[in-house]
Amino acid sequence: MQTNATLKLLLAACALLGASARGDDHFPTAGNPLGSCAVPAAAVAEDVSTPTTVIGNGTPASCTGAAVVQGVARGGVITFNCGPDPVTITLAQPAKIVNNTGPKIVIDGGGKVTLSGGGSSRILYMNTCDAAQVWTTSHCQDQDHPQLTVQNLTFIDANSSGLSPYDGGGAIWARGGRLKVVNSRFFRNQCDAAGPDVGGAAIRAFSQSQNLPVYVVGSTFGGRTDLGNVCSNGGALSSIGVSYSVINSRFTHNRAIGVGANPARSGSAGGGSGGAIYNDGNTFQLQVCGSDINNNTAKEGGGAIFFVSNDRSGTLAITSSVLSANPSAGFETTGLPGIFYLGSGSAQVSTSTLDRGNTTTSANCVFNWGEHHYASLLYPGPATSQTKAPYYYRHYTGTNSYVGISSQDDRLRYMGSASNHQMLDLGSMSTWKQTAGCQ
């Protein structure tokens, strides 16, 4: 029988786990904590030590949506001074990049700023071919500037539904120049619910310079059942003819909700593909490394990834990543759960896990989450999962501790220093999977 002191200690440990996962603003942290892929020099965060524009004078009240719109229009390096606590700034209209205010434009939230569309507005717009935002070259569809970086920011409750002709891009719509996203989060963003060529509740990208990739590094899209991004296609990311390099990032609970695919079936509005990522066009690449893509859904093809290179010149590479429980209600490629792929040769998958969300994958997801958020008890991690019927478990030699599940009742158990080395029942795995964002 466990003592009251032991139970109190364990409850405190569980509370600490939950608090660590939420962060100061109660949302999941940015990025995949287990991602360890190298980040190219071109994809790292930009230096903001000498900002061009500082939004705010040290108080939350000074950080308004209008101030963000004005600051972004001025360009250069943009930072915030909204006080010591996390702040949410609601925009009544998109902040628009002016193309001659670069060449580098950096928007850095310092990990404390959330930009909200209030459920009715897109948040950020860049278009090198929009004369209203200044033409800077004679070949607007392929120019190397502006080079826009958003970093240490959260984008929430953006909505681009009904905007035409710029379909999609709930939070960010970008054409031309370059786009880079670092250490940022995207929650509850949306775009049109129907249409074969609309997509990207979080990001929609076109015409990147010289087909260089959009970098998405250490960022989170969704992360919890109530925070997923939703669109007809591409619940998180969408593009036409644009390459993406997705590094050490996390995509969960994003949804492609259109019906009828592309081209749209007779009698349908079309859409419904790419629960997390939607790529279409000709020559482009999608590289996913060190990333976690789980529990995204598509009503048509590719619960995780929809990739169609029309001339079959594009390539897909997945490295050191986990794709799990991403159902495709309509169609997917044989042998690639959660993926529909048409490109050059076969999709390249290495040191990665692709499955439909079996028990061991869910358990590993919870174990990984615990190792990251409670390293003092589960040390050293990551540990290797083992099976000894009826348990699937991990042993941490540094603390002589165990965590595991039993196939007999699907409940999480712990034995170690926090329980006086007695086995304790921590509750149903369904609860822990939801807490850890694993379902």
Image (cartoon, helix red, strand yellow):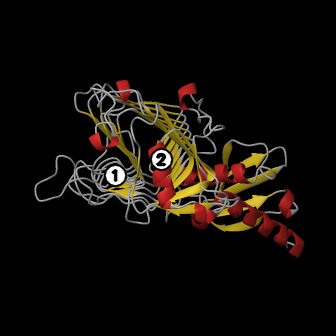
Residue at (76, 47) in percent of width and height: 395
Q: How many marks?
A: 2
Q: Choose between 170 and 246: the one closer to the eye.
A: 170
Q: In this view, does 28 lie to the left or right of 207?
A: right
- Along the line of sight, the residue nearer the viewer: 203 or 229: 203
Q: What residue type is labelled 2?
A: Val
Comes first in the chain, label 2 or label 1: 2
Image coords of residue 257 (percent x, y): 31, 59
- From this view, report whether residue 163 is shown above or below residue 137: below
Depth check, mark 2 against mark 1: the one in front is: 2
Within 10 Å of the Cα at label 2, are there few (<14), some (14-19), or many (20+) other Cα atoms? many
Residue that label 2 marks: 72
For residue 421, above or below residue 286: below
Residue 197 x/y as whole percent:
24, 47
Label pair 2/1, CB-CB below 8 angstroms: no
Residue 138 percent across, percent down from the top left: 27, 26
| Residue that carries the numbered disc 1 in the rendered image | 328
Relative to 317, say whether 428 is above or below.
Answer: below
SS class, disc 1: loop
Could you tell me which secondary element the residue under label 2 belongs to? Answer: helix
The N terminus: image quadrant: bottom right
Q: Is residue 436 visible?
A: yes
The image quadrant that residue 281 belongs to is top left
Give the Cα separation between the discs numbered 2 and 1.
Answer: 39 Å
In which image quadrant can residue 382 be found?
top right
Which residue corresponds to the image point at 65% horizontal and 52% vertical from the top-left? Answer: 369
Q: What amino acid type should be assigned to the residue bearing mark 1?
A: Ser
Q: Neighbour class for label 1 at 10 Å: few (<14), some, many (≥20)?
A: many
User: For the point 66% across and 58% down, which residue is it?
Assistant: 21
